Image (spheres, rainbow, N blue to C red):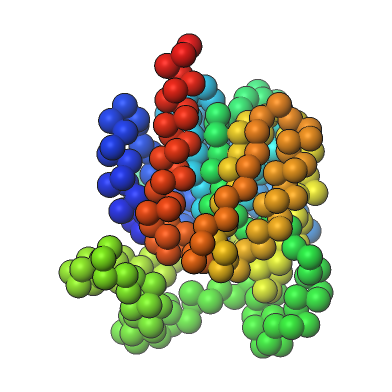
């Protein structure tokens, strides 16, 4: 949902020499809502990761982005998938294997117009070209800023988390029934349901006037009511209660020097466990040549860029300024 970052983009204009790329993850936001491949075995979570990392890798390459001049800001599961992108690249697994292809080819099932079907064929051909090819390891960024990243670490196990979560929710979650399906099945009442969230989320009068609040509600409802797609990966990676099934922390050592510089940013009221960021930064500092730091933002929750708008911009701006100084010395 990149539009929620609208006000952050205004701040970035103060850095005129930067090119800004704002993207939604595949199957999220305004990205194409293709059919999620339900046939993927539940234990094949790395295959699910590659539904996102392979397109992201192709996107970085097609834009000609280079590690020497790139800063990535990734929120929530975008942070997890950014690390997964680099991890699969280092391991040489950032491509779709032949056995995986049969399970996920429906990932690119695009129905509708003749043009859409032609696009589907093009995507399938691209996937086949990737089959059984070796990856060419590269680093994707100089600095990665992870904003309240999910799937990193938790002191609770999935089973313990499920014990403290309502049984009905656990059952629906484990059947991969998306919470957004409620919105989709309510018809006109779906907008009313979403308004309960948007009226609270955007109740920041000094940032959003009434007209902008209305636009943000319309945008949010349109996104939540759209065809389910990328959201179905969540059950593969998270248990009910947002506890990671396969903590990224356990795989960080494989990144080695490819992690680059990382900034782990959490709010003091965040429902993502900032302890995972502290432990991850410590591990990366031990195994890589990059520097990893942790920022705890006062009075902010999961959506730090809204809850603490000025502080968030200050921290990201500091990283951009520091990056500019390094480049100017070269």
Residue 292's quadrant in the figure? Answer: top right
Q: What residue sits 68% from the left and 87% below the top?
A: 166
Q: Residue farthest to the top?
A: 330
Residue 217 image offset from top left, x and y in percent: 30, 71
Residue 164 image offset from top left, x and y in percent: 74, 83
Residue 192 image offset from top left, x and y in percent: 33, 85
Q: How many marks?
A: 0
Compared across the picture, whether 210 is left or right of 268 comes to: left
Q: Residue farthest to the front?
A: 298
Residue 63 image offset from top left, x and y in percent: 42, 29
Q: Nearer the viewer, residue 38 or 285?
A: 285
Compared across the picture, whether 274 is left or right of 256 comes to: left
Compared across the picture, whether 234 is left or right of 118 comes to: right
Q: Quadrant of the N terminus?
A: bottom left
**133 up-or-down from 84: above or below:** above
Q: What residue sits 67% from the left and 52% below the top?
A: 277
Q: What residue sits 73% from the left and 38% below the top?
A: 284
Q: Nearer the viewer, residue 301 or 90?
A: 301
Residue 304 in view of the camera: yes
**169 up-or-down from 58: above or below:** below
Q: Nearer the viewer, residue 256 or 47?
A: 256
Residue 256's quadrant in the figure? Answer: top right
Q: What residue sits 75% from the left and 63% below the top?
A: 154
Compared across the picture, whether 111 is left or right of 103 comes to: left
**51 up-or-down from 323: above or below:** below
Residue 120 in view of the camera: no
């Amino acid at each position: 949902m990149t539009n929620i970052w609208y006000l952050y983009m205004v701040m970035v204009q103060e850095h005129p020499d930067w090119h800004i790329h704002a993207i939604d993850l595949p199957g999220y936001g305004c990205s194409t809502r293709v059919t999620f491949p339900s046939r993927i075995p539940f234990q094949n979570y790395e295959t699910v990761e590659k539904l996102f990392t392979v397109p992201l890798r192709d996107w970085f390459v097609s834009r000609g982005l280079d590690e020497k001049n790139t800063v990535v800001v990734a929120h929530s599961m975008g942070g997890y998938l950014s690390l997964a992108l680099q991890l699969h690249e280092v391991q040489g697994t950032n491509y779709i294997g032949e056995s995986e292809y049969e399970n996920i080819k429906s990932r690119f099932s695009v129905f509708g117009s003749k043009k859409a079907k032609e696009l589907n064929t093009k995507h399938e051909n691209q996937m086949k070209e990737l089959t059984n090819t070796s990856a060419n390891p590269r680093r994707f960024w100089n600095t990665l800023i992870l904003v309240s990243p999910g799937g990193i670490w938790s002191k609770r196990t999935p089973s313990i988390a499920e014990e403290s979560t309502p049984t009905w929710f656990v059952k629906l979650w484990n059947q991969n029934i998306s919470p957004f399906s409620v919105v989709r099945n309510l018809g006109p009442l779906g907008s009313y349901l979403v308004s309960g969230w948007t009226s609270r989320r955007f109740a920041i009068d000094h940032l959003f006037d009434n007209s902008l609040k209305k636009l943000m509600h319309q945008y949010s409802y349109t996104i939540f009511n759209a065809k389910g797609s990328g959201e179905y990966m969540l059950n593969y990676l998270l248990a009910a209660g947002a506890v990671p099934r396969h903590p990224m922390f356990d795989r960080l050592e494989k990144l080695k020097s490819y992690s680059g510089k990382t900034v782990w940013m959490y709010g003091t009221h965040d429902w993502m466990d900032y302890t995972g960021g502290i432990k991850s930064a410590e591990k990366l500092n031990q195994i890589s040549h990059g520097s990893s730091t942790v920022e705890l933002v006062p009075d902010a929750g999961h959506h730090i860029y809204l809850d603490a708008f000025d502080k968030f911009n200050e921290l990201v701006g500091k990283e951009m300024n520091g990056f500019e100084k390094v480049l100017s010395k070269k």
